[in-house]
Image (spheres, rainbow, N blue to C red):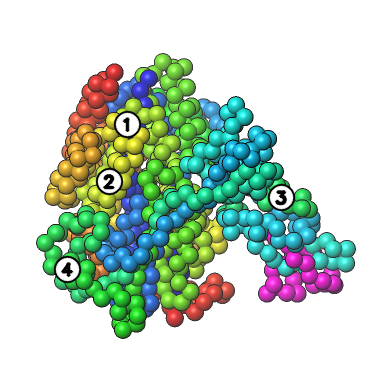
Amino acid sequence: MKLAIASGKGGTGKTTFAVNIAYVSAMRGERTRYIDCDVEEPNGHIFLQPHITDSVPVAIPIPEVDEALCTSCGECKRICQYSAITMILDKVIVFPELCHGCGGCALVCPTNAISEVPREMGVIEKGIIHLAGSDGASSAQSASGDAIDDSNPVQEQTETMPVVDLQAGTEKVFFDFVQGKMNIKESLAVPIIRKAKEYVLDEGVSIVDAPPGTSCPVIESVRGADFLILVTEPTPFGFNDLKLAVETLEQLDIPMGIVINRYGMGNEEVEKFCSERGLPILGRFPFERRIAEVYSRGEILSRELPDYREMIESLLDDVIAMLSRQPSGGKRGVGD
Amino acid sequence: MKEFVVISGKGGTGKTSIAASFVALSGHVVMADCDVDAADLHILLSPKIKHKETFIGGGLATIDPDLCTGCGDCEKLCRFDAISPMKVAVDGKGAIDSGVGTGGSAGGGEGIARKEEKLIYFVDKFACDGCGVCAYFCPANAIAFEEQENGEWYISETRFGPMVHAKLHAGAENSGKLVTIVKNEARKVADVEDIGMVIVDGSPGIGCPVISSVTGADLVLVVTEPTKSGVHDLERVLELTRFFNVKTMVTVNRFDINEEITERIEEKARENGAVLAGRIHYDPAVVEAQIEKKTVVEYSDGTASQDIKGIWDFVKYQMEEEE
């Protein structure tokens, strides 16, 4: 099952639901992978505390011009749709940060003066998630050092976890983690998202955490999912962005459901819209200060709050039930 | 003329509510909504559109199924996995038998005898990056490559003055380009109407629309929240503004949700050379104001409203210091 979580408006709780659904799925013993496609600001790792085992750079090929071979014909500049190539006084100038790596310039060059060299724009990080008991809630993070609860004893345990044994199958890996992370100053998220999506599992449950908004990075993240969950909040901003997200994402022809987070604040517009459009509401999660506090500390809500976990469990059951009713939507056995 | 940009890194921190309040407090500015793919500012400012233009974004390739010979060159050339093959039924003359889709739904065109099948290629418009390479190299000239209408932008009037805003079509590309247009048009309006400041409501994240929002700004305010995610996202966004060498201020919204993290954020901000602009209380009036389609400073005189007024005074002071 490939489940994508998106939101339109930022800060509605998209990552919270992605993390909690992944957590609950893994706790049920399902082979589960959480994939963070919010590559500009990936946050799932804060909650899931993965032990990062592998880091793969993401690069796109950009042109390099051999001036000895270049005849200044200008064909490369003409084919480039991204204004990444210009000519100044018969000299070809490349703007690497504008290049999308389509390869058109190298193909069109009549003198083979253009070769392609990789340019790194981000990284894919892979890791294993250790499901400590409920007392191991906030194990400190190994690499990025932004742990707030520095004194937590679970830190050591996480860092010395026998990763090799885990991978060799002594203990079956059933919950793991992939995140795309865009380098600062880069502007193109899509190549990194595309790479992260290659890690979607064929079997088992993949949870794709999409970026906010409604433009190309969201589409790329959601494409190919079996089911889409849109997280919103019942405020005018939440409602407006939900409409935009639905308008965009319904074109992808993926069955979708809505989660209303911070239910109780705001007004009824979101509810009305969902019933008018026949969009199933998968859950209404109340606005409560205790939830905001657990979240603010970077903890997994369904590990800390049993009633929250029950709501996530029933949300996941509803999605699985809806998928099994889909006539042709479920391409693969749901929840195998 | 000064350009003041409000961004957030993490979404949902209250950026738009705060930017709209600044507009209400300022009296005389041009507002630019650069969060073009999920614009919300219009909800609070109720703009009346005076001028509208279409936004021409990137190109899109489309393959003419009648001309396609099924050679597959385009699929090989496409670096964006946007082109795939499909089988279609053709009539005796080789023309596509309309109404017959891909394999699996065989027997669609009853009545017309299905003589044979033909392999053709098609473009997934959501995956197409608009590079045009397939169209350029198609040996059968079967691929059209045309500029797309990707949205609209507007110059409007609000109760606080002019506003430039935009709407990207569903799923369209090139939001960075549209942000640049909105900003440039806002500057033009400011020039023509002799207004001294443009306030920009940016988008979340650190990618292309944010870079376009920050480019050329005189002062940036980052609105964050006291959560671990907020800390993480702030670091990334401050690295970006430092790279662009823009004077940056930081405010923690809803700081009373977690004061310990608020302190950490403020420490991080100082370490990164940002100026602390003050804290904003959690206040239900922010959402109530949204429902009333008002800015929070118009709607209430409560804690959030008071805090935002204080920050606005400080922003003005910082802008003057920039002179």
Under mark 3, the amino acid is Phe
The verdict on a common chain for dots 2 and 1 is yes
Q: CA distance from mark 4 to mark 2?
A: 26 Å
Q: Secondary structure at mark 4?
A: helix
Which residue position is annotated with label 4? A156
Which residue position is annotated with label 3? B137
Q: How packed is label 4: few (under 14 Cα within 10 Å), some, or many (20 or more)?
A: few
Predominant secondary structure in magenta?
A: loop
Task: Give me the chain letter of mark 1.
Answer: B
Image x and y of residue A266, in percent: 31, 50
Task: Give me the chain letter of mark 4.
Answer: A
Q: Secondary structure at mark 1?
A: loop
Residue at image position (75%, 62%) is B70
**Residue stretch rendered in magenta on the structure:** B97-123
* Quarter occupied by the C terminus of chain A: bottom left
Q: CA distance from mark 1 to mark 4?
A: 40 Å
Q: Is residue A55 found inside the magenta-colored segment of the image?
A: no
* Closer-to-camera residue (A41/A123): A123
Q: Secondary structure at mark 3?
A: helix
Under mark 4, the amino acid is Glu
Tag 4 and tag 2, C-beta contact below 8 Å:
no
Q: Is residue B116 found inside the magenta-colored segment of the image?
A: yes
Which residue position is annotated with label 2? B235
Q: How packed is label 1: few (under 14 Cα within 10 Å), some, or many (20 or more)?
A: some
Under mark 1, the amino acid is Val
Name the quadrant containing residue A296: bottom left
